[in-house]
Image (cartoon, rainbow, N blue to C red):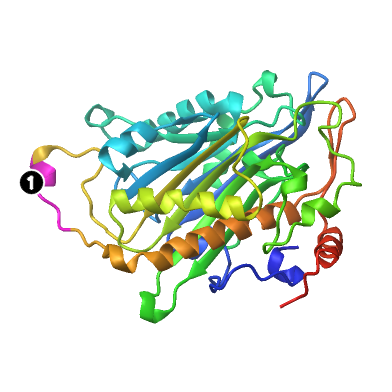
């Protein structure tokens, strides 16, 4: 179930046809999921990969920007985005201890795709959250095969949510979390642009959970927390990827990325020290930017670009906040109960449990 299937309509905007990040034309998402036992250890992890365009990102870069709400996390490739303002690789999301192998495999895949690797360097974007309660994270079970599988499965269309890909072993607001997505499409008079969000939700305290502004977490205390004996409620992280087809420049992408914080706050997150809250936004509205393997002679001296005026950008900010808010709730509703290797129960936030808690707050279906 997703939020709108339950009857929960978040915000004022209109979702795209899929209500997913893939409503932005050209974007593809792929997952590789590991649910197995290796050497007697429980493995619940994987890789989620986002291709920003129908063409390879190296050949058709996007303007991009990033924002860190809380830096208790890790990500590769963001320094060059901050410096140059372009995204030139796919984006991968995995667990904390697998960032290195995912990055190295993406480099290998780039090398295989290049006729002459000597004219190019590659700094892939790889982001993470911690799945160590449900997954043998120290075993580093994600390998090149999972990265290649995620890339081979990347496609447009509906996006699988919950315990898939990088989100397999994640916990959100003390319920089973993981991957979630949503989108908003602006009306024609505001440009008709689409903003899509994808989250890997592994953050938040249950008591602070809010849905549609209602404090549902206060009515869910009878459900045993997975952190009752291990860890601390709220520990974890959230990764947010925002995409739009609006013609934004890098500084505007950074501004868009900042608005992910609002969506997280609306659901009751974003206030924990032990949470890495890192966001990336990219825009596909400009095409034919200099390729990542360019030389001066090939690229020319200047490139014409289009910029959405700043006084027209507020609707995109609203769309981003709403899409992130709904993506988090979708991630929660997609969760299924999971048990750790040592018997810790991670409950699911089912549609019925959520509706009962909402009604206890005085909420009524719109």
Q: Specify the quadrant that holds the N terminus.
A: bottom right
Front-most of 228 and 59?
228
Q: Quadrant of residue 65?
A: top left
**Magenta stretch: dominant secondary structure:** loop
Name the quadrant containing residue 79: top left
Q: Is residue 138 magenta?
A: no
Q: Please indicate, yes or no, whether residue 154 appears anywhere in the rendered image.
A: no
Q: Which residue is mark 1?
A: 301
Q: Position of residue 111 (x, y in %)?
A: 36, 31
Could you tell me if residue 287 is visible in this image? Answer: yes
In depth, the one of 298 and 195 nearer the eye is 195
Q: Nearer the viewer, residue 29 or 132?
A: 132
Secondary element under disc 1, as helix, strand or loop, is loop
Mark 1 closeness class: few <14, some 14–19, many ≥20 residues within 10 Å: few
Is 189 situated above or below 341? Answer: below
Q: Report which quarter residue 115 is drawn in.
A: top left
Residue at 37% over, 81% down: 189
Q: Position of residue 357 (x, y in %)?
A: 84, 60
Q: Is residue 53 left or right of residue 148?
A: left
Q: Going 74% across and 72% down the picture, which residue do you hit? A: 7
- Magenta residues, start to end: 297-304
Nearer-the-camera pick, 201 or 41: 201
Q: Single out the residue that lies furthest toward the bottom.
A: 189
Q: Is residue 164 left or right of residue 263?
A: right
Give the quarter of the figure containing the C terminus.
bottom right
Question: In the rendered view, would you say 122 is above or below 197?
Answer: above
> Is 338 rendered above or below residue 198?
above
Horizontal relation, residue 223 to residue 327: left or right = right
- Residue 299 in picture, x, y percent from top left: 13, 45
Image coordinates of residue 344 in percent, x first then y, are: 87, 31
In the image, residue 213 above or below residue 143:
below
């Amino acid at each position: 179930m997703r939020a709108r299937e339950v009857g929960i309509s978040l915000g004022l905007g209109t979702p795209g046809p899929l209500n997913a990040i893939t409503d932005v034309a050209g974007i593809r998402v792929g997952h590789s999921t590991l649910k197995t036992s290796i050497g007697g250890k429980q493995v619940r992890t994987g890789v989620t990969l986002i291709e920003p365009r129908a063409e390879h990102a190296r050949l058709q870069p996007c303007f991009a920007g990033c924002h860190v709400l809380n830096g208790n996390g890790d990500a590769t490739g963001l320094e060059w985005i901050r410096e140059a303002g372009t995204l030139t690789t796919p984006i991968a999301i995995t667990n904390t201890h697998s960032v290195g192998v995912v990055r190295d495999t993406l480099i290998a895949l780039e090398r295989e795709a290049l006729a002459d690797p000597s004219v190019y360097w590659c700094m892939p974007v790889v982001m993470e959250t911690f799945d160590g309660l449900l997954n043998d994270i120290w075993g580093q079970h994600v390998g090149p095969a999972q990265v290649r599988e995620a890339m081979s499965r990347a496609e447009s269309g509906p996006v699988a949510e919950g315990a898939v890909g990088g989100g397999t072993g994640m916990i959100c607001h003390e319920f089973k979390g993981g991957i979630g997505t949503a989108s908003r499409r602006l009306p024609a008079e505001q440009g008709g642009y689409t903003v899509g969000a994808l989250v890997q939700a592994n953050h938040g305290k249950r008591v602070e959970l809010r849905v549609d502004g209602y404090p549902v977490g206060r009515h869910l205390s009878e459900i045993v927390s997975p952190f009752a004996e291990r860890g601390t409620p709220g520990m974890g992280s959230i990764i947010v990827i925002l995409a739009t087809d609006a013609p934004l420049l890098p500084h505007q992408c950074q501004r868009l990325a900042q608005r992910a914080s609002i969506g997280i706050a609306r659901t009751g997150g974003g206030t924990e020290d032990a949470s890495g809250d890192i966001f990336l936004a990219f825009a596909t509205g400009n095409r034919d930017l200099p390729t990542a393997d360019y030389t001066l002679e090939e690229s020319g001296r200047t490139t014409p670009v289009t910029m959405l005026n700043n006084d027209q950008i507020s609707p995109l900010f609203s769309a981003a906040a709403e899409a992130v808010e709904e993506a988090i709730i979708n991630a929660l509703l997609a969760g299924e109960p999971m048990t750790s290797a040592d018997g810790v129960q991670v409950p699911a936030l089912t549609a019925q449990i959520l509706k009962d808690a909402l009604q206890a707050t005085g909420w009524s279906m719109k």
